[in-house]
Image (cartoon, grey):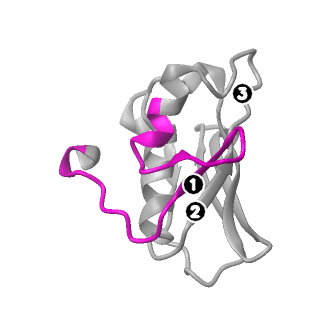
């Protein structure tokens, strides 16, 4: 997707926000990608990350994850990995994607956690 074809809505969010939403839009206003998070039981959870099939492999998910990690770096972050297209949590590409942002496995199956103030390697921002 060329730069002029996408509209960015990845904005800084207050660390005190109970919910956070990051989106990319198509020129016609349709949502092309989205990341949702909310506080549940006192912890920040990513509740949904998706990219429209026609926009995958173009960096939208990575941009949203970078913004999310930047905005909530000071607190532990959690996600429950569910792949809707037949893959499992143990898909190497899916795990590597979340691990590149500092998420790692927990003792609970399919739950990943990122400790607070994790420092991403410089190459993660290239």
Q: Residues within 10 Å of mark 2 (few under 14, many from 20)?
A: many
Residue lying at 54% horizontally and 28% vertically, measured from the top left: 94
- Between marks 2 and 3, how big is the CA–CA gap? 19 Å
Q: Residues within 10 Å of mark 3 (few under 14, many from 20)?
A: few
* Quadrant placement of the C terminus: top left
Left or right, 93 with reference to 33: left
Residue lying at 50% horizontally and 65% vertically, measured from the top left: 11
Compare residues 81 and 24 and report the one nearer the observer. 81
Name which quarter of the figure residue 33 lies in: top right
Q: Is residue 96 above or below residue 39?
A: above
Is residue 80 one of those drawn in magenta? no
Q: Which residues are magenta?
A: 96-123
Compare residues 27 and 63 and report the one nearer the observer. 63
Residue to which mark 2 is pinned: 77
Q: Are marks 3 and 1 in contact (CB under 8 Å)?
A: no
Residue to which mark 3 is pinned: 83
- Between marks 1 and 2, how big is the CA–CA gap? 6 Å
* Quadrant placement of the N terminus: top left
Q: Are marks 1 and 2 in contact (CB under 8 Å)?
A: yes
| Residue 77 on image: x %, y % | 58, 62
| Residue 73 on image: x %, y % | 44, 70
Compare residues 10 and 114 and report the one nearer the observer. 114
Taking the view exactly as shown, the residue that stands out farthest to the bottom is 16
Residue to which mark 1 is pinned: 113
Left or right, 120 with reference to 91: left
Q: Secondary structure at mark 1?
A: strand
N-term-proximal mark, 3 vs 1: 3
Q: Which mark is residue 35?
A: none
């Amino acid at each position: 997707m060329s730069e002029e074809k996408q509209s960015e809505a990845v904005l800084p969010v207050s660390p005190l926000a109970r919910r956070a939403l990051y989106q990319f839009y198509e020129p016609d206003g349709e949502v092309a990608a989205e990341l949702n998070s909310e506080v549940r039981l006192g912890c920040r959870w990513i509740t949904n990350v998706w990219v429209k099939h026609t926009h995958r492999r173009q960096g939208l998910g990575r941009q949203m994850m970078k913004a999310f990690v930047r905005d909530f770096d000071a607190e532990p972050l959690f996600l429950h990995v569910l792949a809707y297209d037949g893959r499992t949590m143990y898909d190497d590409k899916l795990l590597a994607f979340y691990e590149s942002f500092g998420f790692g496995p927990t003792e609970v199956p399919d739950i990943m956690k990122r400790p607070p103030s994790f420092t991403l390697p410089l190459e993660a921002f290239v």
